[in-house]
Amino acid sequence: MRPAARAAPWLLGPLILAVAILAGTAIGETRLPPATVWQTLANHLWGASHAVDRIDAGIIWSYRLPRALVAAACGAGLALTGVVLQALLRNPLADPYLMGLSAGASTGAVLVSIAGVGAGAVSLSAGALAGALAAFGAVVALAHAVQGGTGGGRGTRAAAAIILAGIAGSQMFNALTAFIIARSANAEQARGILFWLMGNLSGIRWDDVAPAILATLAGTGICLWHRRSLDAFTFGPDSAASLGIEVRKVRGLLITVTALMIGVLVSKVGAIGFVGLVVPHAMRFLVGTRHQRLVPASALAGAVFLVAADVIARIIVPGQVLPIGVITALVGAPAFAVILIRGARR
Amino acid sequence: MSLSVHALSVRVHRAQLLHDITLEVAPGECLGLIGPNGSGKSTLMRSLAGLLRPRAGEVRLQGQPLARLSARTRAQRIALVEQQADTTDRLRVREAVELGRTPYLSPLRGWSPQDDARVDRALAAVEMTALADRLWHTLSGGEQQRVHIARALAQDPEVLLLDEPTNHLDIRHQLALLALVRELRITRVIALHDLNQALGCDRLALLDGGRLRAIGRPEEVLTEAALRRHFGVGAIRTTDPSGQPALHFTHAL
Ligand SMILES: Nc1ncnc2c1ncn2[C@@H]1O[C@H](COP(=O)(O)OP(=O)(O)OP(=O)(O)O)[C@@H](O)[C@H]1O
Ligand SMILES: [Mg+2]
């Protein structure tokens, strides 16, 4: 292939993402013409002086654009984490919440919003981040206690231990969440928290954009740096070790980095399911299993998918905004079924 | 490169899998590892590859303790073909062999034409060139085994560890593989179940119950008494029509 032809897909991806983000700012309850969107952006970004309606400009710049940007960062982060966990743990069902992150974030969120921990001084998102990291710590400690020993197939058993510990930790934190809701929430609060648990981007403002994007960019960079290590896990951790990978070090680093990233993202938008599970599998069909291509492709596809899902969540029921997790699950579950069936037939 | 094992003991949980093993493999030598199921051949292989941390004793490469080498350096010197390794990834044969170049690549040093040449050579050595674009899960067991061997060869090792490499191979590929291994100039350790094939090694080490029971030239190790005692079979030593020594197994004891 000529260099130009080879570079084309990598220009196409960001282009599609840019178009999706622009669409995300144009489409909503009040549909605004692309020209207005463009003029508003121009006014803000390079001080052009187009005459734009003040309210329209406010909607575009203060609400929809940060929302679309955070959606893109979340989609990319979730998909990327799915890629990494599926590769390291050699389990096609591994997803970003396996490590107890969403369960812990929910517990933190209900502790703040319903049980009143922090007495109003702690934000919901700070509580969720603390909860996610506490749960992750608990899962890691449990996995450590379970694995023990140094014998044959050590790496393989450690992967199994992490998965089991993640399931146990998630269940425990979910039970805690349910307990707190049942004990102290009124119906109104319960509805609000349910909305948050399914993913909610409506509270996103500019303050949230930088942390989300920085977390995702840092995570993507670190995963790309370790792309060959991720490849080396193809035949399992023992095989990776014989190819010169320091399995424990690399696995610990990448799982911690992605957990921190997901912790930040979940604390902003709640637990959005299926992106991290489905997008990596779909991208393996498209670009193959080598992480040099799979990591950027999944991040881009996840970003586009979540921006699109957010647009759909805003317009599918007129006058009402659905939790974005409902859309990702409604699209993601059938897509996952198709992938499984195709996988079985291949 | 020489590989030596000094008073090596390996323990998993409470089970002691290897007891106080000492042996030496000379540079360029081919050492056969034999023993009944569960005798510790794979465990010793994994220790030689640096995948198991011993409880006592150590493995040395060219006199240097293996534990002191970085994983990357170790992988540039030692390649291991495991007894079994599978994947659910949709991976092509060539990509699987390319993994063998991992220890020579870094985040900044990318793939080079030399790497391609190594991969081509490894594929040709196991006669898999024609299947290079096939997907992993469409291969037969023997073909998968040959890909694993190609991956180890692509690693360009100075010590090659093969754990039952002739498993799943048809007779022609068994003989071809053993001939290929015999021609390599590097140090080789190879675990084998077919004792007649083991006769072709330079020396044999006999394991039973995690202990080294005998080591030496094949005809010294594979005596009728040793076969009786450690493998539980009656056997007669003969010479085949071409004049090579051979074992004829008569019955299980
Ligand atoms: N993680 C482990 N925990 C407990 N015992 C183990 C473990 N791994 C291996 N063993 C035991 O150690 C012994 C040696 O195993 P090993 O795989 O080295 O045997 P082997 O000589 O390669 O056998 P085979 O010819 O069947 O391949 C076996 O009895 C096995 O059951
Ligand atoms: Mg074995």
Image: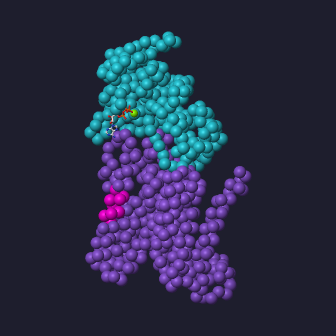
Near-viewer residue (A172 or A259): A172
Q: Pinpoint residue A200: horizontal percent, then vertical percent.
A: 46, 75
Q: Pinpoint residue A180: horizontal percent, then vertical percent.
A: 29, 74
Residue at point 59%, 49% (across, down): B108
Examine the rendered structure and indicate whether residue A233 appears above or below residue B39. below
Q: In this view of the protein, can residue B137 be seen by the observer?
A: yes
Question: Where does the magenta region start and end?
Answer: A165-173
Task: Locate residue A307 relative to residue A190 in the image: left or right.
Answer: right
Colour displayed for chain A in the image of the structure = purple
Quarter of the rendered image showing ligand 2: top left
Residue at point 52%, 83% (across, down): A318
Q: Main secondary structure of the magenta part?
A: helix
Residue at point 71%, 51% (across, down): A1
Task: Locate residue A15 relative to residue B48 in the image: left or right.
Answer: right
Q: Pinpoint residue A241: horizontal percent, then vertical percent.
A: 45, 42
Colour displayed for chain B in the image of the structure = cyan
Q: How many marks?
A: 0
Residue at point 48%, 33% (across, down): B168
Examine the rendered structure and indicate whether residue A247 appears above or below residue A15. above
